[in-house]
Image (cartoon, rainbow, N blue to C red):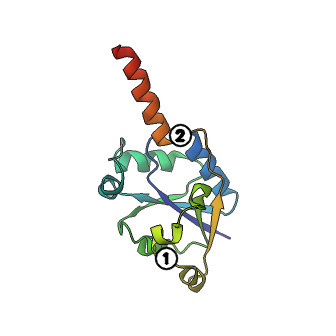
Amino acid sequence: MKYLYTGGTFDLFHAGHVNFLRQCKKLCEHVIVGLNTDDFVAKYKTPPIMSYSERESVLLSCKYVEKVVPNLSGEDSKPTILSVRPDIIAVGDDWAKKDYYKQMNFTQDWLEDNHMVLVYIPYTKSISSSEIKKRIISINGDKNE
């Protein structure tokens, strides 16, 4: 397996991101990240703290990432995935209990037709961008009292 695709926002790059990408790299020669655009993130979550170019720069500095491509197709990630033509699509195992197929707008048949496999990578439970934001708010709240 040569190419692995994973998509995401990768805001406030942290140890959980590094751990995930390290595990991805163990599965293939090339890790390619489909990075969500600022507009897409703002539409479905809170706007990212870091801009697209900042998040892209951090990802490209990570030794486990070979390439970053913008996820310009938003909800339908298939065009971005097809532009990469990966052997593997990787996602955190926090998605194992959710409908990742629906989120990505593809089916098992679509994966098989395109000779791709979906793998779930163990999620680092102790850290997330949301957790970092909560820590910052907590620290700032303590200073205001």
* Residue 93 picture location, percent across and down: 62, 57
Across and down, in percent, residue 15 comes to 58, 40
In the image shown, does 63 or 21 lie closer to the viewer? 21
Asked if residue 35 lies left or right of residue 6, the reply is: left
Toward which corner of the image does residue 140 lie, by quadrant?
A: top left
Considering only vertical position in the picture, is 13 above or below 89? above
Name the image quarter holding the C terminus: top left
What is the three-letter code of the residue carrying label 1? Phe
Q: Nearer the viewer, residue 12 or 54?
A: 12
Residue shown at 49% from the left, 37% from the top: 131
Secondary structure beneath label 1:
loop
Q: Residues within 10 Å of mark 1 (few under 14, many from 20)?
A: some
Foreground residue among 41 and 141: 141
Q: Quadrant of residue 87?
A: bottom right
Label 1 – label 2 distance at C-alpha: 29 Å
> Which residue: 43% across, 25% down?
138
Q: Eyeballing the image, is 28 above or below 112?
A: above
Q: Disc 1 designates what residue?
A: 106
4 above or below 65?
Answer: below
Question: Label 2, on which residue?
Answer: 14
Question: Which of pointers 1 and 2 lies earlier in the amino acid sequence?
Answer: 2
Which structural element holds mark 2? Answer: loop
Q: Nearer the viewer, residue 138 or 110?
A: 138
Marks 1 & 2, CB-CB < 8 Å contact: no
Q: Position of residue 82 (x, y in %)?
A: 48, 76
Q: Residue at x 68, y 70 (%)?
A: 1
